[in-house]
Amino acid sequence: MIGDERTFINLVNEHQGLIHKVCNMYESDREGRNDLFQEIVLQLWRSFPSFRGESKITTWMYRIALNTAISGYRKKTRKVKTEDLNEVHLNISEPYGNEETEEHLQQLRTAIRQLSDIERAMVMMALEEIPYEEIAETIGITQNNVRVRMNRIREKLRKQMTAWRWKSTI
Amino acid sequence: MEIDDLKVLWKKESERFTPKDKAELESMLKRRSTSIVSRLKRSVWFELIFTIAGGVALLLYAITLPAGPLGAISVSVVVLFCVYSLYYFKKLQLLNEFDPANDNLLATLNRLIDSMKSYLKLYKRSYAVLYPFYFFLGLFFTALDYGTEAFISRISRPEIIVALILFAAAFFACSTWLTGGCLKKLYGNHLEKLESLLNKLRTTHDS
């Protein structure tokens, strides 16, 4: 059991970026992200004994993380704290450095947040360059449906990002 | 802006998180889950333990009592606690059917919705059965208090019968309405959100 726990912790440690991305995608404030992170780790730990390595470890982790974020987790109603104001209302976290990149990142975050929970899951996996086959397996739809849906999402994002670019040049 | 441009941006976004160290990750395994199923399980376990402890205490007290109304009341409450315990076991059984997250999203949503619906149905049905049970238990206690003959002569008067029927109807309507309202507030919104997600997925699936 201790050996299992150590293996599991090493695994989560190695791939924790994936969990952080899911949390950033579904929670806008720091407290919410921390709660979701904790819940995903717990659900991964519970499901760890049944992981037999039939799929890639990242596919398994995405599946559980997205299931937890989308269906199994009920968001708490929180009062917005002053320190979270930047993140909640302006969606500003630590600046990346380059002002233009920061602005584009901000636009990308806002555009993604306007998508539905399922669309967010799909776009995140696509941005992670996960093949359509694995996206279809994680969501439970056919590859063809993933393709159709991704085209729509791409179009939505393109319109949104182009509109912002156009506005910023005025 | 094309998806490849977005991928470049996304990679930059991905580099920005503050990693959690191993000790913190390890401590997370010891904390409690906040998932909706885990919360429901915790509350049912609490109710079950409370009912069993209360039942045992009441049974021990009832054994010491001489035969009479108080003893009968105590025993009937113990019987009621036994029924409640079975009911809590059934609730736990329903909740245990939900295995957290190994399936794909579509299957998980389907199972979670089914599991929650069965749970809520059992909740409502059990109250629909228990309220009349409480009502007749109330009548039984009143009969014990008045004495059987006096109680029957009193209860057989038409105005009392009408009043009892009206009271029973009002009690049943208000309590089921209250139960429905509470359940909707506690789980209804989450269930609606899950159903809407499932519909969206099905639309995707059919398109």
Image (cartoon, helix red, strand yellow):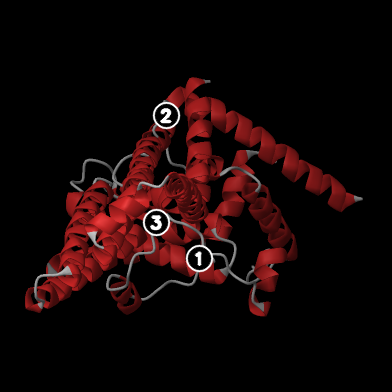
Is residue A123 depicted above or below A110 in this figure?
Answer: above
Q: Cα distance, mark 2 to mark 3?
A: 25 Å
Q: Chain of mark 3?
A: B
Closer-to-camera residue (A72/B131): B131
Q: Chain of mark 2?
A: A
Q: Kindly check if marks 3 and 1 are in contact, taking CB atoms under 8 A apart as contact.
A: no
Q: How many marks?
A: 3
Which three-letter amino acid code belongs to the residue tagged 3? Ile
Which quadrant would residue A39 be assigned to in this image? bottom left
Residue A33 badge: 1
Closer-to-camera residue (B180/A81): B180
- First of labels 2, 1 by sequence position: 1
Which three-letter amino acid code belongs to the residue tagged 2? Ile
Q: Quadrant of the N terminus of chain B?
A: top right
Residue A141 badge: 2
Mark yes or no: residue A70 visible: no
Q: Looking at the picture, how far across and down is residue B64, in whole percent? A: 8, 78
* Residue designated by label 3: B36
Between marks 3 and 1 in the image, the one whose residue lies nearer the viewer: 3
Q: Residue furthest top?
A: B207
Q: Kindly check if marks 2 and 3 are in contact, taking CB atoms under 8 A apart as contact.
A: no
Is residue B118 depicted above or below B62 in this figure?
Answer: above
Q: Looking at the picture, how far across and down is residue B57, in whole percent? A: 15, 76
Secondary structure of residue under mark 3: helix
Q: Residue at x 46, y 44 (%)?
A: B162
